Amino acid sequence: MKVYKLYVRDEYLEMIKSGKKVIEVRVAYPQFKGMKPKDKILFNNLVPAEVIWVKQYETFKQVLREEKIEKIFPDKPSFEEAVKRFHGMYPKWKENRYGVLAIRFRLLKPEE
């Protein structure tokens, strides 16, 4: 089991803590290549979670077509707005070069 430290913007951390955001989407950088179920995530060094599944996609658009947007962005933006958010966080060349990961997780209690 490996522990991944992921940093998210404060508004997304609040969505994770509330249990509304349950899928984290990232560019599939090489350091995430071996991520698998039962691995742990520590969001912003504060919020522990466990990986349930990891799926590889080619693009952010593909993720948004196949996963429920409200599990990624609980404030339910439109498809186009969600794509814009991702491209505001990641340059298009990184998406094209590495692909995209959707990481389904569950929150852990601090003692888990």
Image: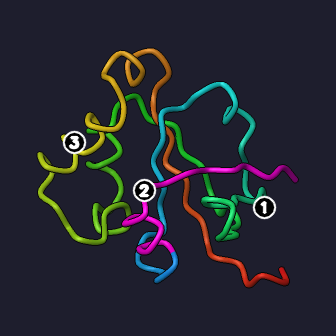
98 left or right of 92? right
- The disc label shown at residue 108, or none: none
Q: Secondary structure at mark 3?
A: helix
The amino acid type of the residue labelled 1 equals: Lys
Whichever of labels 1 and 2 marks the residue nearer the N terminus, that label is 2
- The disc label shown at residue 83, or none: 3
- Relative to 112, say whether 70 is above or below: above
82 left or right of 89? left
63 left or right of 79? right
Whichever of labels 3 and 2 marks the residue nearer the N terminus, that label is 2
Residue to which mark 2 is pinned: 9
- Relative to 48, say whether 81 is above or below: above
Residue to which mark 1 is pinned: 38
Q: Which residues are magenta?
A: 1-16
Q: Residue 51's x, y, as percent? A: 67, 60
| Residue drawn at point x = 40 percent, y = 28 percent | 58
Q: Nearer the viewer, mark 3 or mark 1?
A: 3
| Residue drawn at point x = 73 percent, y = 84 percent | 109
| Residue drawn at point x = 66 percent, y = 25 percent | 30
Q: Nearer the viewer, residue 107 or 9?
A: 9
Q: Residue 70's x, y, as percent? A: 29, 68
Whether 37 is among the magenta residues is no
Q: Residues within 10 Å of mark 1 (few under 14, many from 20)?
A: some
